[in-house]
Image (cartoon, helix red, strand yellow):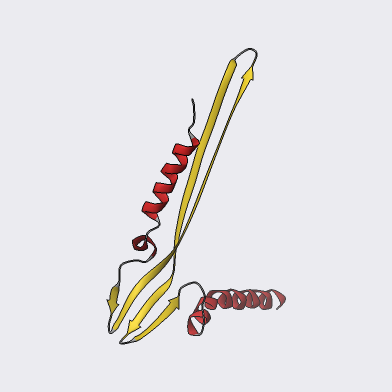
């Protein structure tokens, strides 16, 4: 099996061009009350390939190759407009009240552990 790396690279390049376009990275706009929102997504792609050939006195010449790839997408936030104001709201970092709510399960666990310890010592 002969592998043509130039042809493979061309196919991978075409694939990236077709997938990493604005419509993939920035989602469809929607309205939420008086706000217009546009989701923003992070896209990461990785590809790898390799091949080799060799000879064995008993089995003759041989060659092999392989190709692999992966794509990951994750929402990172929203572009939000209200009138002439535009802002970006991140989904990656918590702040304010939302960060407090994220910590509630940990606080409950700590309180339950304290209660168990107190009951065991009593």
Quick one: which residue is furthest to the front in this view?
6
* Above or below for 89 versus 56: below
Residue placed furthest toward the top: 58
Q: Which quarter of the image is occupied by the C terminus?
A: bottom right
Return the x and y of residue 74 as percentages of the image width and height: 45, 63
**In the image, 33: left or right of 6?**
left
At 60% from the left and 78% from the top, the residue drawn is: 111
- Quadrant of residue 35 within the rendered picture: bottom left
Q: Is residue 101 above or below residue 48?
A: below
Residue at figure coordinates x 36%, y 52% from the top left: 18
Residue at position x 44%, y 37% in the image: 7
Q: Nearer the viewer, residue 78 or 117?
A: 78
In the orientation shown, which residue stands out farthest toward the right? 121
Image coordinates of residue 112 in percent, x first then y, are 60, 75
Residue 40 or 17: which is nearer the viewer?
A: 17
Where residue 99 appears, as percent x and y from the top left, is 52, 80
Which residue is at the front of the view, 98 or 30?
30
Left or right: residue 42 versus residue 27 is right
**Residue 69 vertical position relative to residue 44 in the rendered view, above or below:** above
Residue drawn 65% across and 13% down?
A: 57
């Amino acid at each position: 099996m002969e592998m043509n790396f130039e042809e493979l690279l061309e196919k991978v390049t075409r694939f990236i061009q077709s997938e990493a376009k604005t419509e993939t990275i920035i989602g469809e706009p929607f309205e939420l009350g008086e706000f217009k929102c546009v989701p923003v997504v992070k896209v990461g792609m990785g590809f790898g390939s390799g091949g080799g050939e060799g000879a064995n006195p008993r089995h003759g010449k041989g060659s092999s190759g392989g190709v692999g790839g992966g794509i990951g997408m994750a929402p990172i936030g929203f572009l939000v407009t209200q009138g002439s104001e535009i802002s970006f709201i991140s989904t990656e970092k918590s702040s304010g009240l939302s960060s407090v709510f994220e910590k509630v399960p940990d606080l409950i666990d700590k309180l339950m552990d304290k209660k168990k310890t107190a009951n065991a010592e009593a």
